[in-house]
Amino acid sequence: MYVVINGGGKVASYLARQLLGRDHAVALIEKREDIAHKLASELPDGALVIHGDGCDSVYQEDAGVSRADVFVAATGDDDDNLVACQLAKVAFGVPRTVARVNNPKNEHIFHALGIEAISSTTIISRLIEEEATIGDIRTLASLRKGDMAIVEVELPVDRCVVCGKRVADLDLPGDCLIIAIVRGDDAFAVHGDTEMQPGDTVIAFTNVEHERALKKALTGS
């Protein structure tokens, strides 16, 4: 599989290494010259690193986006990620576009445009290879016409109010479901007996009206 990634930060470089390690072909577009040179020297052999703006068709063409199986926009700017994915879809006909969403409230915009969006780095890498998973997420997101969202909440390292408790025992707001935990470089689905640890990133499916209440239930603030 050929994957083109826009962005050269920690998220993008992590994804590139994960995909290269699974024997996929990867091209990465980064507009900061110093970061592009750094990635070119640090990424495993076989990675193509292009210095340029991934929102510009010229650099997407240089990266061979027209023959890509997947285009991933993984910068820290939701606007750039949206533009880059739309360009890849419309101008180059990429069959699948996946975007990092930095603000979960923007997620419905990406879904409305047919862009697969998620806010967890590790889950993005899995979605690329597990289409059934992203299909389930897309279906859930459309059930309530934008009333539902997938959000991430980082648990505090100190005074964690839910750490050591079973997920089944948590007092969560209605319409809230914890679906995954990101711990370090690993991500895993949760079960009723799963216990959280300080510093975990919790991925939850929730009614947008309950986002603040969910955060309070998980962090105490």
Image (cartoon, rainbow, N blue to C red):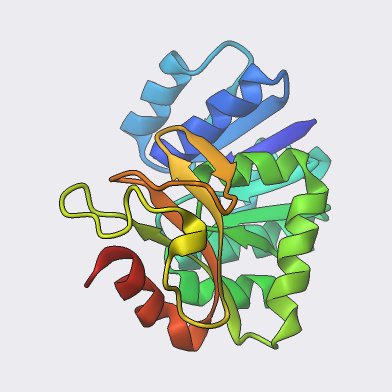
Tell which of 210 and 130 is nearer to you: 210
In the rendered image of this protein, does residue 217 appear above or below residue 95?
below
In the rendered image of this protein, does residue 49 appear above or below residue 160?
above
Where in the figure is residue 188, as x and y percent of width and height? Answer: 57, 41
Res. 204 visible in picture: yes
Residue at horizontal 52%, vertical 60%? 168
Counting the numbered discs, the total is 0
Tell which of 151 and 112 is nearer to you: 151
Residue at horizontal 34%, vertical 44%? 197
Question: Toward which corner of the image does residue 210 lie, by quadrant?
Answer: bottom left
Name the quadrant of the C terminus: bottom left
In the rendered image of this protein, does residue 31 appear above or below residue 144?
above
In the rendered image of this protein, does residue 87 appear above or below residue 40?
below
User: Does residue 195 appear left or right of residue 149 in this picture?
Assistant: left
Tell which of 178 and 130 is nearer to you: 178
Residue at horizontal 56%, vertical 34%? 28
Where in the figure is residue 75, as x and y percent of width and height? Answer: 45, 51
Where in the figure is residue 125, as x and y percent of width and height? Answer: 62, 39
Name the quadrant of the N terminus: top right
Where in the figure is residue 14, as x and y percent of width and height? Answer: 48, 32
Res. 59 visible in picture: no
Q: Residue furthest top?
A: 45
Question: Toward which corner of the image does residue 143 lie, by quadrant?
Answer: bottom right
User: Does residue 28 appear left or right of residue 63 in this picture?
Assistant: left
Residue at horizontal 76%, vertical 38%? 129
Q: Residue furthest left?
A: 158
